[in-house]
Image: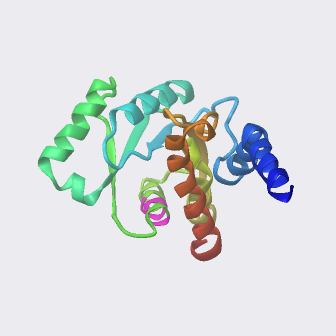
Amino acid sequence: MLSTIFALLLISLWISREFWLKTLVNAYIVDEIPTSYPHCEHLVVENWTGDYEIFVHAKTFAEKTGAKTIVSTMYESIFNHPRLKQATLLNAWSAELDTTTLVFFVVPFQEPKTLNLAKAVIDSAHQRGWKEFSLVTRDLHSRRSRLCYEKFAKPLGITVHILPYEREFNHRNWFHSITGWTVAFPEIIKQLYYDLVVL
């Protein structure tokens, strides 16, 4: 009898997962999704491997925010590898970005990656005299990005506007499939690690 009740409870939790699990997890790892876009001259896209799809999102956000300067983050190892750097530029060009004006902020590949990436970007923005910029980052990663960037930006008086983009598995649908869980679950673990240890 007790095992039947437990089984029914598990089944009802699984069936209703969209209502409780989505709400709990998204609140923990997803930053607020903006309904409007800030007018901002500078746009930084977290795209350290030169992914084409992310460049497409960057172009869309640049048009919506009126950004004049588009910056892509790039790991040192990729920046120093001619073929990988060329592939990144080709992906940016294929996404119809102006590769003659595309700027790269070269960042270290060093744990904790998001924190070190944020520090490198904020240092570069500060050296250029920026007072604000928009940050294009994945929706399921957006809260951790915001917390890391704010840690370094606030003391320097720099405002960072978070612009989350969606991929195939995103804050709307990750809980519907096992693959979506494999995307969201590591983000939950990393956010917990950052909350308890890093930040």
Q: Is residue 132 visible?
A: no
Q: Is residue 50 visible?
A: yes
Q: Is residue 129 above or below residue 199?
A: above
Quadrant in which the N terminus is drawn: bottom right
Q: What residue is shown at x 13% (from left), y 45% (from top)?
A: 83
Quadrant in which the C terminus is drawn: bottom right
Q: Residue furthest bottom?
A: 197
Query: Does the magenta portion include 172?
Result: no
Query: Looking at the picture, how far across and down is residue 91, in whole percent?
Result: 27, 32
Question: Left or right: 141 with respect to 36?
Answer: left
Q: Is residue 118 above or below residue 21?
A: below
Query: Looking at the picture, how far across and down is residue 85, in whole percent?
Result: 20, 45
Query: Looking at the picture, how far across and down is residue 21, in whole percent?
Result: 73, 46
Which quadrant of the structure image shows residue 157? bottom right
Q: Is residue 174 above or below residue 149?
A: above
Which quadrant of the structure image shows residue 93? top left
Q: Residue furthest left?
A: 82
Q: Main secondary structure of the magenta part?
A: helix
Which quadrant of the structure image shows residue 35? top right
Q: What residue is shown at x 55% (from left), y 63% (from top)?
A: 190
Question: Where does the magenta region start and end?
Answer: 115-120
Q: What residue is shown at x 53% (from left), y 34% (from top)?
A: 166
Question: Left or right: 34 with respect to 9?
Answer: left
Identify which residue, 1 or 128, lies in the foreground.
Answer: 1
Query: Does the magenta portion include 119?
Result: yes
